[in-house]
Image: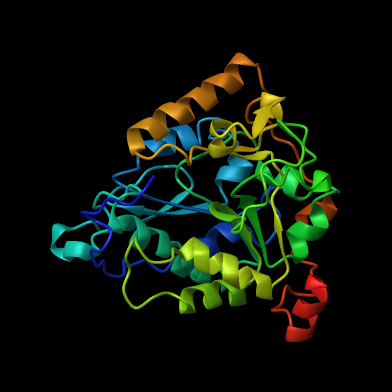
Amino acid sequence: MPHSAKFANLNRKLIDVPNVGQAVGEVLLVPSTCVPDYAVMLSMATTHHMKLRHHQFALVRNLDCFMSRIVSVCYGFTDSYGRCVFSSCNKSLGLANPCLPSDYRRSQYVALNWAKWPLFIDSLRVARSALWLEADVVIHRNPWEVLLSTPQLQRTVFDAVRYQWESPPCSVPELVTSSAVACVKSGWPSPHPEPLNCGQLLLNSLEFALEVWASRPAVFKNGAMSQQGYANLIKGNYSHSGLPLNFFNLCWKAQRYVKIVDQCELVTFHATCEMVAKTKRLSMNTSVNSAAKHSCALSQQKTLTKAQLGAFATRVTQPTRLTVIRVRDSLD
């Protein structure tokens, strides 16, 4: 959808992001049998999106070992989904008010999207790994079960960043292997020029987050390159990979790129192609109801193995910025 001409060139100010370092440190002290040591899940919502939270956590809200490791920035409200770090939406903040309408057509959208990077930085000063899921992502089951499975563990632990695909990489068969999702046609769509979508990210590198944040423009405008655009450029300096297609993007289905072959194998459902909070909520509710319709097992307390729980604690080689030589080698 094109940017609204009325809003595209309006300047927006930096949004204040509360420091979540203490909250992250406190949840990391909570023992968990289904989230690895030193790992946390992050999210963010404003009053504009707070009704999405019920749907986001509907299928896992009773999974205590998972919910106890969640930290969210909550602008203008609080709730009981994990640890909710409150921040103000006072009208006196003017254009820096995070609770101004923030759909894709308005300039507040770009300011709010940039606000996630200080959250990542604060978190990665304390945690060794942070899983970011935007407020319009339904969590169907514990993501760490898939992220730390044998095929995924090496990438999950040692890549600086893993990301939801902007378009599914159907032209590379080994990247689309999934028990949940299948491409409608092999080799289509063409590879996306900016494959990283910031709606779902696994971050292991503080340096990566700092570099993206340092790249931000002096003035936020929707007409300029988005934070996702900068992240796509900068990821080339780091080890990176796409998340499994079980981390689903509604746009893939809307654009007829893929089909869901097993609803119960979905890890997440990102309602990213819906442009406003109301339609996002309806789409997320449909995803939750579909899991119930297919009798998917909900909120099962599956215990990770000792090796999985300690995967980040025992990591010696840290994800680092690639040297110029290594970047060249990777492109040959």
Q: Going by the image, does 127 lie left or right of 178?
A: left
Q: Going by the image, does 196 lie left or right of 323?
A: left
Q: Tell me, yes or no, if residue 120 can be seen here.
A: no
Q: Going by the image, does 245 lie left or right of 109?
A: right
Q: Position of residue 299 (x, y in %)?
A: 63, 31
Q: Residue at x 48, y 42 (%)?
A: 272
In which quadrant of the rendered image does the C terminus lie? bottom right
Q: Where is residue 103 in the image (x, y as percent from the top left)?
A: 33, 47
Q: Where is residue 205 in the image (x, y as percent from the top left)?
A: 64, 71
Q: Tell me, yes or no, if residue 321 can be seen here.
A: yes
Above-or-below relation of 30 to 79: below
Foreground pick, 58 / 115: 115
| Picture quadrant where residue 86 is located | bottom left
Foreground pick, 17 / 7: 7
Foreground pick, 274 / 152: 274
Q: Residue at x 74, y 57 (%)?
A: 156
